[in-house]
């Protein structure tokens, strides 16, 4: 069957959603195999400390698999034989362990540039921390901190000298993250005590080969993408991406296409699926790969999306932690959410519909909010406080049930 060289916006959306795993119905009981298949499609899971609803790396799995036991992810990322490991693969992210060799050139680049903390981490400090972890085993910065004062110039960081040094050693591949504490602190250890032996024994690809592999994976996860989309997925250098795309086009792995409304050339992965329909019904984390690249989200869905976490409250348009609502193959609304674990309530500060949202949007969103509350172990979904979708959503939530039994 011949591949198209032109895609409508709707076709491109369906290609993108199929590539991300949204053709599968939610599983009644997701397994480790389900998780592995899902991560093969997303490629990476962005890690972020914000926990107003649920931490970022858990939610994309729920969006695709339905309610799952988060211990599946803990086992894959923190127990032998590890299948996932943290690295700066998009930004901070969990990635398949087999990508470690392809990241060696990135690690070398950080070492040459002295990492993010170049002016603050001396060779002696780095060597001392590496020796300490070698002797003590898996350690947090708090456990290795010598009491040195923490920097306070930015409210969002406040890292100790030990944490800066450990982060430098992690960025350069001299340490790996073995897991995280309940307080979300990284636990650092030697790569040989974290990664499977076969991963460490694998040959390091040259820079061109590593770049092709990263672009190849980005193209599989996107389905159809511009060069800018492919570059962003693994945060690659422009020259490396451009060369890799040209080589993969020459090899027939990427097929040049035009997409309705896109000003940039696009590339279709040769194995991408073009389904007739996508029947998704889920919420997307602000850190979901579908909405990472805001220009792409707008080009595919006509959906302008910005995270407002760092916007002062009076200046926010939609709210603090706003999740797009995917219904069918479109983003038809957005909802501001917060998990109040003390009262067992999923709070809904605001709910908003897109101009072309179908009439059944409120009913579908109500069902999805109950699904999410159940997965989070919350018993009640609160009535939304504001937004043009609030009134119909209140009615749908009331019609569905006053509360939600997560075991039901």
Image (tube, rainbow, N blue to C red):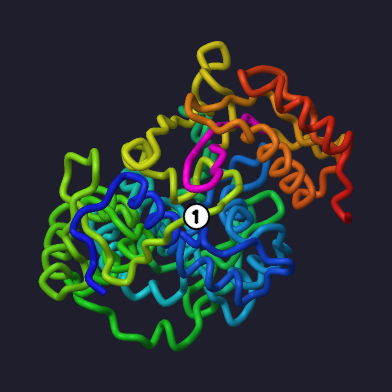
- Residues drawn in magenta: 324-337
Q: Under tag 1, what secondary structure?
A: loop
Q: Which of the 4 image quarters holds residue 323?
A: top right
- 323 or 164, which lies in front? 323
Q: Quadrant of the C terminus?
A: bottom right
Q: Which residue is mark 1?
A: 278
* Image x and y of residue 85, in percent: 50, 68
* Image x and y of residue 373, in percent: 77, 44
Mark 1 nearby-residue class (10 Å; few <14, some 14–19, many ≥20): some
- 66 or 145, which lies in front? 66
Q: Is residue 116 left or right of residue 32?
A: left
Q: Which of the 4 image quarters holds residue 379?
A: top right
Q: Magenta stretch mostly in which secondary structure?
A: strand
Residue that appears at 73% across and 66% down: 28
* Image x and y of residue 226, in percent: 23, 50
Residue that appears at 73% across and 69% down: 29
Residue that appears at 71% across and 28% down: 393
Q: Which of the 4 image quarters holds residue 325?
A: top right
**Number of marks:** 1
Does 326 lie within the magenta span? yes
Residue that appears at 44% across and 48% down: 290
- Give the vertical position of 57 relative to 304 (above or below): below
Q: Residue pushed farthest top?
A: 314
């Amino acid at each position: 069957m011949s591949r198209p060289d032109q895609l409508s916006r709707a076709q491109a959306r369906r290609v993108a959603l199929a590539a991300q795993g949204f053709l599968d119905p939610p599983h009644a009981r997701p397994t480790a195999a389900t998780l592995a298949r899902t991560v093969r499609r997303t490629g990476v899971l962005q890690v972020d400390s914000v926990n107003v609803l649920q931490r970022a790396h858990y939610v994309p799995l729920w969006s695709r698999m339905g309610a799952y036991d988060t211990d599946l992810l803990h086992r894959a990322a923190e127990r032998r034989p590890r299948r996932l490991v943290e690295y700066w693969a998009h930004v901070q992210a969990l990635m398949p362990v087999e990508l470690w060799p392809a990241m060696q050139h990135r690690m070398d680049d950080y070492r040459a540039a002295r990492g993010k903390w170049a002016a603050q981490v001396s060779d002696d400090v780095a060597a001392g921390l590496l020796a300490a972890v070698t002797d003590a085993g898996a350690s947090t910065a708090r456990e290795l901190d010598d009491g040195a004062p923490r920097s306070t110039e930015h409210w969002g960081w406040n890292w100790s000298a030990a944490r800066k040094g450990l982060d430098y050693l992690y960025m350069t591949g001299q340490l790996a993250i073995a897991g995280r504490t309940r307080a979300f602190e990284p636990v650092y250890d030697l790569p040989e005590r974290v990664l499977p032996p076969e991963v460490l024994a694998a040959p390091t690809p040259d820079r061109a080969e590593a770049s092709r592999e990263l672009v190849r994976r980005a193209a599989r996860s996107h389905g159809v993408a511009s060069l800018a989309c492919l570059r962003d997925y693994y945060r690659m250098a422009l020259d490396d991406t451009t060369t890799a795309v040209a080589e993969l086009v020459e090899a027939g792995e990427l097929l040049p296409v035009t997409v309705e409304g896109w000003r940039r050339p696009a590339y279709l992965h040769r194995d991408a699926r073009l389904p007739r329909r996508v029947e998704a019904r889920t919420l997307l984390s602000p850190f979901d790969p579908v909405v990472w690249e805001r220009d792409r989200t707008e080009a595919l869905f006509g959906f302008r999306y910005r995270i407002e976490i760092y916007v002062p409250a009076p200046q926010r348009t939609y709210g603090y932690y706003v999740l797009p609502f995917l219904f069918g193959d479109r983003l038809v609304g957005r909802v501001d959410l917060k998990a109040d674990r003390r009262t067992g309530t999923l709070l809904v500060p605001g709910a908003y519909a897109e101009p072309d949202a179908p009439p059944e949007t409120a009913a579908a969103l109500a069902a999805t909010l109950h699904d999410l509350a159940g997965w989070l172990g919350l018993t009640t979904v609160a009535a939304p406080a504001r937004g043009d979708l609030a009134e119909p959503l209140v009615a749908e939530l009331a019609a569905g049930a006053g509360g939600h039994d997560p075991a039901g």
